[in-house]
Image (cartoon, rainbow, N blue to C red):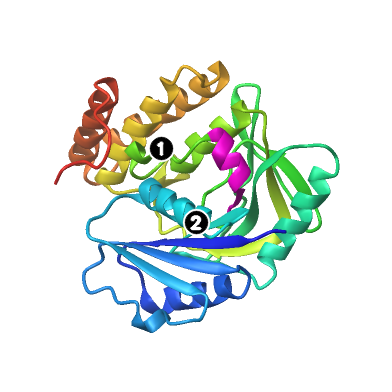
Amino acid sequence: MRKIIAVIVTYHPDAAQLLRLIERAAGQADQVLVIDNATPGFTSSAFALPNVQVQVNHQNLGLAAAYNQGVEFGRTQGASHILLFDQDSCPSPTMVKELVDAWEQTEQRGLRVAAAGPNYTDAKGRYQSPFVKIQGLKLVRVPCGQGETVEVDHLISSGCLISMEAIDDVGAFEDQLFIDYVDTEWCLRARQHGYALLGVGAADMEHDLGESYLTVFNRRVPSHSPLRHYYLIRNGCWLISRPWVGWRWRVIDSVRLFKILVVFSLFSVNRYQHCRMMVVGLFHAVRKKMGKLPT
C-alpha cells in the first residue's frame, strides 16, 4: 500500500499562501510535515489540521537538510513516498492522483521509477514547462500535454513525488549544497543509478518562480540576487566536478555557468556585487568550501 508524506519547507513564508498549500497537500497526502527554517515569529497554531505536524528549526539549515529531515520523518511513519513542496507552490486538487496513476502505468512497462513531477504554471501567469532532457550537448525542454507522460533527466523538487525505495538506493539529498542544485544533483544521481524520472502532463501545479528578469540583446534572462548567484556558481561548479557526473552534463552546465558569470558581471545593475559573489562561489567550489555562506 502507498503511504504518502508531504514535506513543506518554509522560510519567511506568506501565511495565506502557505495555508492554501497546506490545505491542498493535506487533502491528497496521508500526513503533512511543515518544516520551517528559523523564520522569526513563525507559529504553528494557524496550521492546525488533523494530519499536519510542524517542526521549527532554530537556525536556517537550508533546503536539502530540511528535505532530509522530512525523509527521516517519513521513514518513521512508514511512508512509501515523500511529496516535496516549497512554500511558493500550490498543487491542483488532483495532482497527486495523476502522479500516482502515471507512476503505476510506467512501472507496468518494467521501468524503475524514482520520482514523478507535475507541469506547473507560474503564479504570475507565464507558463513554463519544468520538464527537461539531455539531447546531445543541449538541455532541451520536453513538451508534455494533458494525458502524456515523458521520461526526463531533471525535475524541480517542489511538487515532486519520490519513492522511499529510491531514496534508500540513491541516497539522501546533498545538504552541503544548502540551496540551488539540490534537485538537479539528486536527479542526476538517480539517473546514474538507472532510475526513470517522469514528467506528468495531467498533474498541474501553480508555482511562483519569484524571479525578476534582465534583458540582454532583446532576450529576457532570469535574474537572482548576488547571494543566489554565489550558490548557483559554487554548487554548479562543485557538481560538475563529481566523478560520477557524465561528460555531457559537464559540458552543458559549464557553458551555462560561464554565460551566467559573464552576463551578470557585465549587464546587471549591481554588476560588481554579482561578479564578486560569483567569483567567491567559484573559489569556494575549487576549495570545496560548501554549506551555508557565513553572514
Counting residues from the N terminus, which is met first, the one under dot 1 or under dot 2? Answer: 2
The residue range painted magenta reads 160-170
The spot of residue 87 in percent (x, y) is 43, 64
Whether residue 197 is visible here, answered yes or no, is: yes
Q: Which residue is mark 1?
A: 174
Of residues 126 and 246, the one nearer the viewer is: 246
Q: As shown in the figure, which amino acid type bears the numbered disc 2? A: Thr
The spot of residue 237 in percent (x, y) is 37, 26
Of residues 59 and 92, the one nearer the viewer is: 59
Residue at position x 21%, y 69% in the image: 40
Q: Mark 2 falls on what kind of element?
A: helix
The spot of residue 285 in percent (x, y) is 29, 26
Whether the magenta-drawn stretch holds residue 165 is answered as yes
Residue at position x 48%, y 60% in the image: 7
Q: Which residue is mark 2?
A: 76
Using the image, determine if residue 8 lies above or below residue 191. below
Q: Are marks 1 and 2 in contact (CB under 8 Å)?
A: no
Q: Residues within 10 Å of mark 1 (few under 14, many from 20)?
A: some
**Residue 54 sits in quarter:** bottom left
Q: As shown in the figure, which amino acid type bears the numbered disc 1? A: Glu
Of residues 85 and 30, the one nearer the viewer is: 30
Outermost residue, left direction?
295
Relative horizontal placement of residue 66, taking residue 253 as reference (left or right): left
**Closer to us: mark 1 or mark 2?**
2
Whether residue 124 is visible here, answered yes or no, is: no
Relative horizontal placement of residue 61, taking residue 204 as reference (left or right): left
The spot of residue 94 in percent (x, y) is 70, 69
Residue at position x 69%, y 59% in the image: 2
